[in-house]
Amino acid sequence: MKKQEINIKHELSVEETVDLFNEISKSISEGTISIEYGEKQISLKPGCRFDVEIEATRKKGKQKLNIELSWKEEDPTCACKPVLKISSQEPIQEPIEEEPAEEDKTVSEKIDGDDEAKEDFSRGEDTQGIKTENEKSDGDNEVKENIPQE
């Protein structure tokens, strides 16, 4: 493929510069950066990961900030790598739901997926110490609730 290139050197106000950076940011987010300048035009498809170079200089009354973004052409459906994050704050973690202890599980929880146990239970046969929905474990004491059956 033939190299396509647009070089622009143009003076902008602060507001115009802010608008330019906002538009670049929006274009990166949307997956296409299209640049037109006079008769020239180029469209770029950002990848998942960027190489970023920033150079700031100040000398003899002139200041300069160069920002360079580069990336490799990739499949647009590429899976992005995890983001490296370093902070002095500990991350907030979602509470982990614990599975109930085997002895605290109800009949439906214990026999779920066990067709033979379901058949035994439906015939009223011994389910080998499995508690019914109306029975709960209270430490070492077993508590039975009187819940009317329909």
Image (cartoon, rainbow, N blue to C red):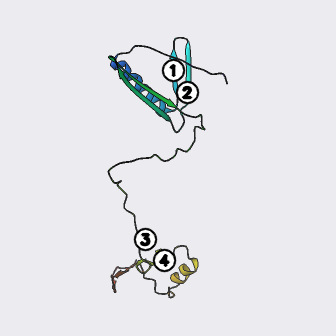
Can you tell which of label 4 and label 2 is closer to the viewer?
Answer: 2
Residue 110: which disc?
4
Q: Is residue 123 above or below residue 97?
A: below
Can you tell which of label 4 and label 1 is closer to the viewer?
Answer: 1
Q: Is residue 79 above or below residue 37?
A: below
Q: Is residue 35 above or below residue 38?
A: below
How crowded pointer 2 is (Cα within 10 Å; few <14, some 14-19, many 20+) is rated as few
Q: Residue furthest top?
A: 38
Residue 49: which disc?
none
Q: Residue 78 at what x, y percent from top left? A: 57, 42
CA distance for labels 4 and 1: 63 Å
Q: Earlier in the sequence, mark 4 or mark 1?
A: 1
The residue nearer to you, when weighing 34 against 119, is 34
Residue named by callout 1: 35
Residue at 56%, 76% (x, y): give it. 114
SS label for mark 4: helix
CA distance for labels 2 and 3: 50 Å
Residue named by callout 3: 99
CA distance for labels 2 and 1: 8 Å
Q: Are marks 2 and 1 in contact (CB under 8 Å)?
A: yes
Residue type beneath disc 3: Glu
Can you tell which of label 3 and label 4 is closer to the viewer?
Answer: 3
